[in-house]
Image (spheres, rainbow, N blue to C red):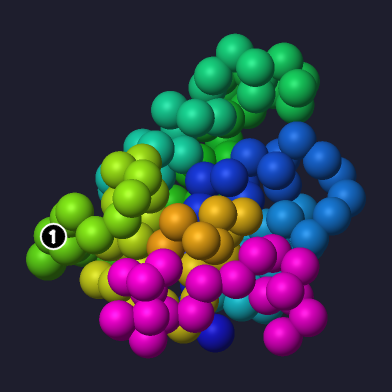
Amino acid sequence: MLIVMDTDVLVAALRSATGASRAVYQLLREKAIEGAASVALLLEYETVLLREEHLEATGMDRDDVSLILDELAVILRPVVPYFQWRPMLSDPDDERVFETAINGQVDVLVTFNVRDYFPAAHRFNLAVLRPGEFLRRL
């Protein structure tokens, strides 16, 4: 199963040692499921994780974030966005995640913002699930 993880799921996974987001993140790290990301999405992860509020909440510093991103860059399948699908969503901040999912031909986009991706996701027959629902379906 190939997934794209929305930035909010990665943030939640790093802010809490328990919960569905952490479980999804661990499955990716253990290669029990396969993930995908574009360079633009990895840069978005970096920008968000380096926000002061997230650094304080996680107890991480810039080096810790770099290590996490380096690991993700190794384990996630690279997606080259051959086609730009913008604008399709009501929230422009979600466009990178959506384009990565479509261009990467993933099975599931895992996010807390399920509503933000409809009806565009339906048009591409893309499953959009919250972390807990995704885990239940596995």
The quadrant of the rendering that contains the C terminus is: bottom right
Q: Which residue is mark 1?
A: 84
Residue 108 picture location, percent across and down: 50, 76
Task: Determine if residue 23 is in view.
Answer: yes
Where disc 1 sits, the SS reads loop
Q: Residue at (42%, 63%) from the top-left corner?
A: 117
58 left or right of 17 in image: left
1 left or right of 32 in image: left
Q: Residue at (79%, 60%) from the top-left corner?
A: 20
Quadrant in the rendering for residue 134: bottom right
Quadrant in the rendering for residue 47: top left
Q: Which residues are magenta?
A: 118-138
Task: Determine if residue 36 is in view.
Answer: no
Q: Nearer the viewer, residue 100 or 132?
A: 132
Category of crowding for the residue at label 1, using alpha-carbon neighbours closer than 10 angstroms: few (below 14), some (14–19), many (at least 20) = few
Quadrant in the rendering for residue 80: bottom left
The quadrant of the rendering that contains the N terminus is: bottom right
Q: Residue at (55%, 54%) from the top-left corner?
A: 113
Query: Is residue 121 covered in magenta?
Result: yes
Q: Amino acid at mark 1?
A: Gln
Residue 89 picture location, percent across and down: 31, 56
Residue 59 picture location, percent across and down: 76, 20
30 left or right of 125 in image: right
User: How many numbered discs, if any?
Assistant: 1
Q: Residue furthest left?
A: 83
Query: Is residue 135 covered in magenta?
Result: yes
